[in-house]
Image (tube, rainbow, N blue to C red):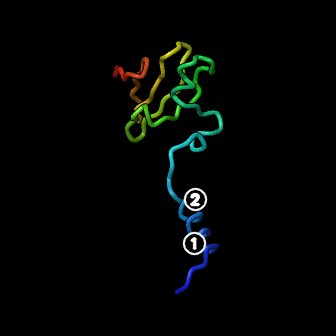
Amino acid sequence: MKFTLSSIAILLVGVASTAPTLNARAFGDDAITLKQADTGKFEPGTPVVDGALKLNEGESCTTTSTKGVLGCDDGTGGTFNIVNGKREDD
């Protein structure tokens, strides 16, 4: 079987486009990174998506009205905060 450069490129693009990624698009266009959240310039409730949060499956965080504090949901109805990058379980 002989592959041409263009067929290899098409194959690579197809594989890359199907790979799962964690990014802002999965949470809407309004999702921001942890660094952006730490500026305090975003409305409370803005989704924060960042690998640095080290969230478990089903957990999610949003900005709060307090700079440096994220309000998080554990996916089962429980909540916790992340304050200045450190998790504080309720």
- Mark 2 or 1, closer to the camera: 1
Instruction: Answer above or below: position of 46 versus 12.
Output: above
Taking the spot 60% from the left edge, 68% from the top edge, the residue there is: 9
Residue 52 image offset from top left, x and y in percent: 43, 33
The residue tagged with tag 1: helix, strand or loop? helix
Choose between 4 and 14: the one closer to the eye.
Answer: 4
Taking the spot 51% from the left edge, 57% from the top edge, the residue there is: 19
Q: Residue furthest top?
A: 66
Taking the spot 62% from the left edge, 39% from the top edge, the residue there is: 28
Q: Is residue 45 left or right of residue 77?
A: right
Choose between 49 and 45: the one closer to the eye.
Answer: 49
**Quarter where residue 57 is shown:** top left
Taking the spot 57% from the left edge, 25% from the top edge, the residue there is: 36
Residue that badge 1 annotates? 8
Instruction: Answer above or below: position of 88 versus 18.
Output: above
What kind of residue is marked 2?
Answer: Ser
The residue tagged with tag 2: helix, strand or loop? helix
Distance of label 2 from label 1 (alpha carbons): 14 Å
Residue 56 image offset from top left, x and y in percent: 37, 38
Residue 86 image offset from top left, x and y in percent: 38, 22
What kind of residue is marked 1?
Answer: Ile
Residue that badge 2 annotates? 17
Q: Is residue 77 left or right of residue 63?
A: left
The numbered disc on residue 72 is: none
Residue 77 image offset from top left, x and y in percent: 41, 30
